Amino acid sequence: MKTGKTSLDRYTRSPALGLILLFLAAVLVFYLVIGENARIAVADNMDLFQAQYQMLKNEGIFFTQGSEAPFLGGISRDVLPSELSLTGLLYILLPSFAAYVALYLLKIVTAVVSFCLLAQELKGRILGPESSAERAAGRPEHAAFADGGAGEKRERAFASLSLLCGFAYGILNLFPSFGICFASIPLILWIILRLERASGKKEFLLCLAGCFLYPLVSYFSYFGLFILAYMAAAFLLVSICRKKPDLRLLAAIVCMSAGSILFEYRLFRSMLFSDEITIRSTMVIADLSAGEILSQIRDVFLTGGAMHTQSMHRTIVLPVCVVYFLGANLVRIFRKDLRAVREDVFNLGALTLVFNSVVYGMYYCGPFRRLVEALVPPLEGWQFGRTSFFNPFLWYALFFIVLVRLYGALDAAYEKRSGKDSGAAGMAARLYHLPPYLLVLLSILVILKMPGGYNDLYNTAHAEANRLLRGVEEDSLTYREFYSEDLFDAILEDIGYEGEWSAAYDLYPATLEYNGIRTLDGYLGFYSQEYKDSFRKIIAPALAKQEPSRQYFDAWGARCYLYSGTNVITVEPTRSFHHNEEPLDIDPDAFRALGGRYIFSRIKFNNADALGLVLRGTYEAPGSPYVLYVYDAGE
């Protein structure tokens, strides 16, 4: 029986949508009130991309060609983020902190919309493969799902659960600068499925346009190359199964490749048309034993593996998915219904999860990694273990499938028990249908309440609660304090700064870069090996005293910092600071040879005279936790 309600009606009328909109509004108001007093994650965030976007704005080089960025002694603008991306456009149009908040909100919206589009497209397969009995009876696939009032109730549940699971995926505290890239993974899957099923020329061309434009919301090195690889594998498998080439999927690959080249032309220009030897050629990646590789595979499967992909699935999502996987497939095997095992989209997703985890572990298998680099030399140093970036989406997609099927099973059980249409409202019916909603809401609470990492919302709320209710100021820095713009404005005016090359000590170079100071140091995973060798001469005295720092710099080198010869930890992004005076272990002549003039330090040097450094002043300002010593190395 038709109800007259469209799928869109069920989404727009769902209480879940109201909950999501309320959350977005609350977050917006929260950040409007808190402003730059928010506690924003530092690692690979404020010390990296946030400063780089601001630097591009300060220098006016977002769109320029052949220009240099004023850090690491002056490197090509091309190695920094493209201006032709949705994330880049946000930073062009908005102040940096506002862009960061907008990126978080837009990430959630993108995840919810993309997740729901994909859910609707795959509805038949999500509800489950037909059983042998259903096939034997010649029943239409999932005919019972849409029968009468029970069908309408289940349709509403499908919409609500897809909204809530998409929301859970959207609020995951993943790599912030690539939030939209993560959130849009289900979008490209939806576009490809629509392309495969397009019934007319117009729809087909629109889907191809979607593939071409998709790189605007993605990033080739972290996501795009992997997506194209998955698409190529699908093309081969489908073509073999159909015994003819899948020309539609091939067209999608061509269009997305063309879009990637256009929108990330700077990246491709650097990779393909530069003969510069970079630090990737000397990066040392650990060759682990078989046992250690298995441990890596286990960890990435259970936890996400790295800070960038902490999907918080271990407490609720993983147990639910594992129990369902074992239970459903054991029943099918017992019934000798292997076709249902093969056709279940849940099993395909689970297999992909395992595959991604295995590839992540194999990245640390030396012979395998070197084979990949030998076969495809441009990929030398490329972290193909980033297949783990796709696991957070897969976990919550599988979780959604289980919840939808659980709802259907509970609804069928209630209908059988009550002997009447399960679409009828009532307390008993609501209690019967509660478990799927309870599970997804608990999973959302786990994400929101997990401290640390990139959970800026929790960290900020926790710090503000401590300050207001207990009078305790947490040691972490706020966004405003981390960059301390007023303090640096005063310093630069006092010393008459005119663009001289500088460096930071016990202070992130990103703080200087954000404030318009040209730095010899910096953080980037792709710069000249020649420059790394030149910079190493500056810090050689410190590296000689601290073996861990030497190994860290020589084997990796992305953090090209002034290292301490006294402590292994060089930078402490905290409010409290208890260092006494200590020596600065550098080669001052090498510093000057690279054009270095100023050193901005949180520590006073007791060997400044011996190094030929002159203390230009000691600076502090209201609202800043820093006491900075500015040293002049002379011209």
Image (cartoon, grey):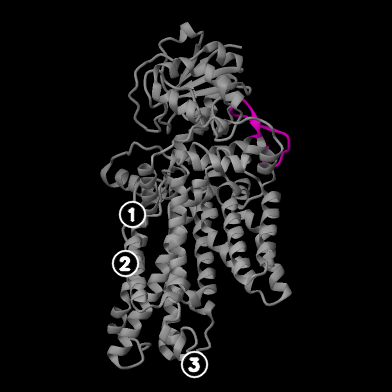
The residue nearer to you, when weighing 619 against 45, is 45
Q: Mark 1 is on which residue type?
A: Lys
Residue at the image point whose x is 43% and y is 57% from the top: 354
Give the mark nearer the N terminus: 2 vs 3.
Answer: 3
Could you tell which of marks 1 and 3 lies nearer the N-terminus?
A: 3
Disc 3 residue type (three-letter): Met
Q: Which residues are magenta?
A: 59-76
Q: Which mark is residue 449?
A: 1
- The residue that appears at 51% across and 8% down in the rendered structure is 612
Q: Dot 3: what SS? A: loop
Is 39 rendered above or below residue 311? above
In which quadrant is the C terminus drawn? top right
Name the residue type under label 2. Val
Report the residue marked by disc 2: 323
Distance between the alpha carbons at the discs numbered 1 and 3: 43 Å
Assign a secondary structure to mark 2. Answer: helix
Does 60 lie within the magenta span? yes
Which mark identifies residue 1? 3
